Image: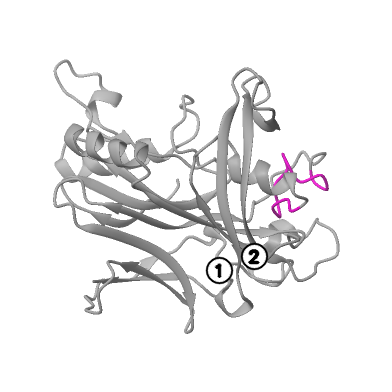
Amino acid sequence: MATLNILYEDPHILVCVKPHGIATQSKSIRYPDMVSLIKNHLAKASGTSGKSGAPKSIDSRTPGSAEPYLAVIHRLDQPVAGILVFAKTPAAAKDLNKQLQNQGFGKYYRALVTNAPSEKEGTLEDYMVKDARTNTSRICSAKENGAKIARLHYDTVPDHGRLFSTVSGSSSSVDVSLSSQSQECHKTELEIHLDTGRHHQIRVQLASIGCPIVGDTKYNPELTGNKGWQTIRLCAYKLDFKHPVTHKAMHFQLEPIRHNSVILKRGAGNSHSSFSPIHMPSMLLLHPQSELLHISQG
């Protein structure tokens, strides 16, 4: 059973880390998704869960009982890990969705790519269209039916600020999934800021400039024939938004630091509050030695 890694929770919102391989929300009941994991957590906290740990309304279908309210605000592709915020009340959901529509969210990613882009930093702007039949997206012309503008900004990350391991196939368990790839070499890490949130946007746009993401079996030409599971080197590592009730700036960021840990920053001030470390799942694929989260608050 997947572990739920909660970074922040209050009566209005819940912020957590989604591991690789788990869907944000899925119609299938065979495998857990983030929504079911969080609803189970909320049900247990409120004392409304059944014997299996799931909300009673899901297990026993008790008339009149209601499963916990939870609204999905934004999503990550199933192979992608990173930070997500969920709303626990309709009012919080309304405010967060409004922020998202008005570009009030700061969504930042790190990606390990097979080739360095021709420019160390830049903006990619394309039109994209989704193929629902194949669950893929592609670059298209502005006039094509269903075309939507897709825009992102990228910057090359210096070696000392990298989030991912620079060498895969190492002794670390988080890199085992890359052992089947070509001869390992020093990959380029990019920081990406999204202006839009199209289906598979980062993966498609980076592949279009000859910089496919390591481990991407859909858009990396070296891996598209692979049938086995690959762990994509893409992480939603930073998230900024305003609290839907207090309107305080909320800042969450994963950073590799020394002493085998990752630091999670919240807020922008200089004061700090101590919290208990939260175990970081190895599936998140941060630096091989990064296994803990510490939280600081500004």
105 up-or-down from 92: above or below: below
Q: Earlier in the sequence, mark 2 or mark 1?
A: 1
The amino acid sitting under disc 1 is Leu
Q: Quadrant of residue 185?
A: bottom right
* Nearer to me, 5 or 93: 93
Whether residue 285 appears in magenta in the rendering, the answer is no
At label 2, which amino acid type do we have?
Answer: Glu
Residue 20 x/y as whole percent: 54, 49
Q: Residue at position x 24%, y 24% from top?
A: 57
240 lies left or right of 118 = left
Task: From the image, give the main secondary structure of the stretch colored magenta.
Answer: loop
> CB atoms at circles 2 and 1 under 8 Å apart?
yes
According to the image, label 1 marks what residue? 163
> Does residue 113 appear in this view?
yes
In magenta stretch: residue 221: yes
Task: Examine the image and state in which quarter residue 49 appears.
Answer: top left
Q: Which mark is residue 189?
A: 2
Left or right of residue 223, residue 163 in this image: left
